[in-house]
Amino acid sequence: MYTPPFFKPDRAASLKFAEERGFGTMCAFDGHKPVASPLPFYLTYADDGTPQAAFHAARHNPLLKLADGTSSWLLAVNGPDAYVSPDWYVSPDQVPTWLYQSVHLTGPVRLLSDSELAVQIDTLSDKFENWLLPKKPWTSAKMTAGRLEAMKKAIVGLVMTVEEVEGSFKLNQHKSDADYAAIANALGAQADPASRTIAGLMREARPLAFATDTVQTQQAITPEGGV
């Protein structure tokens, strides 16, 4: 992944982003063309601290033939993105661009045993069911044994040993405070939820750029002659 230094998050931040997102596109190369599938995953760690991305795929997915435990795969994890109009900048002579968050995890992938797959199914569902709290979490125990086994036979578990972690959090970090705040404010006013999410991330990442906005707001609401 091409990442200018000012957009590059550290390894811990990249892994945290990937784990919280929990969904990406797994890509491999079959010798002639790329093969890819969108899928959910969760991160775990080996005894030596090496990250591992656990997931599963349908038994007829062509990716399975490529899981030889040595060939390197790519897991692309994308977050929100937003278009930026040059008209929104304070400074002149700007160009259109996109802001976004993305992390790439790279490493070999191996197949899991049936017992490992059973653990993975429960771990993966538990991860996403917890997003829905206070709803009582669904578990595989709610299924009849026969139905669960039939479903398990239709999928194959896999795990990537993550050898490389790359991230790019492009939030206009290289712009002046005035331009940075102007873009965040413009994005925050858009109807698109992703644009508003990017605006929130920009405010979190660089709160001092909005100090002038805060002072102006306070001055506007302070009664004449107030302190």
Image (tube, rainbow, N blue to C red):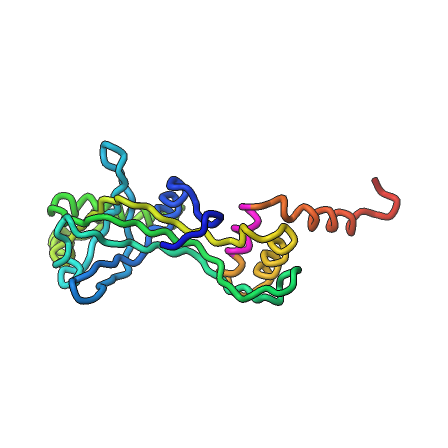
Residue 40: quadrant of the picture: bottom left
Question: Looking at the figure, which quarter contains the N terminus?
Answer: bottom left
**Residue 143 vs residue 112, the one in the foreground:** 112
Residue 133, given in percent of the width and then of the height, sits at 39, 47
Q: Residue at x 43, y 45 (%)?
A: 9
Of all residues, the one furthest to the right in this rendering is 225
Q: Which residues are magenta?
A: 197-205
Residue 97, given in percent of the width and then of the height, sits at 51, 63
Of all residues, the one furthest to the top in this rendering is 47
Question: Looking at the figure, which quarter contains the C terminus?
Answer: top right
Residue 11, given in percent of the width and then of the height, sits at 37, 41
Residue 33 placement, left or right of 136:
left
Residue 197, given in percent of the width and then of the height, sits at 51, 56
Q: Is residue 199 magenta?
A: yes
Q: Is residue 27 magenta?
A: no
**Residue 72 vs residue 130, the one in the foreground:** 72
Q: Residue at x 26, y 38 (%)?
A: 50
Q: Residue at x 45, y 51 (%)?
A: 4
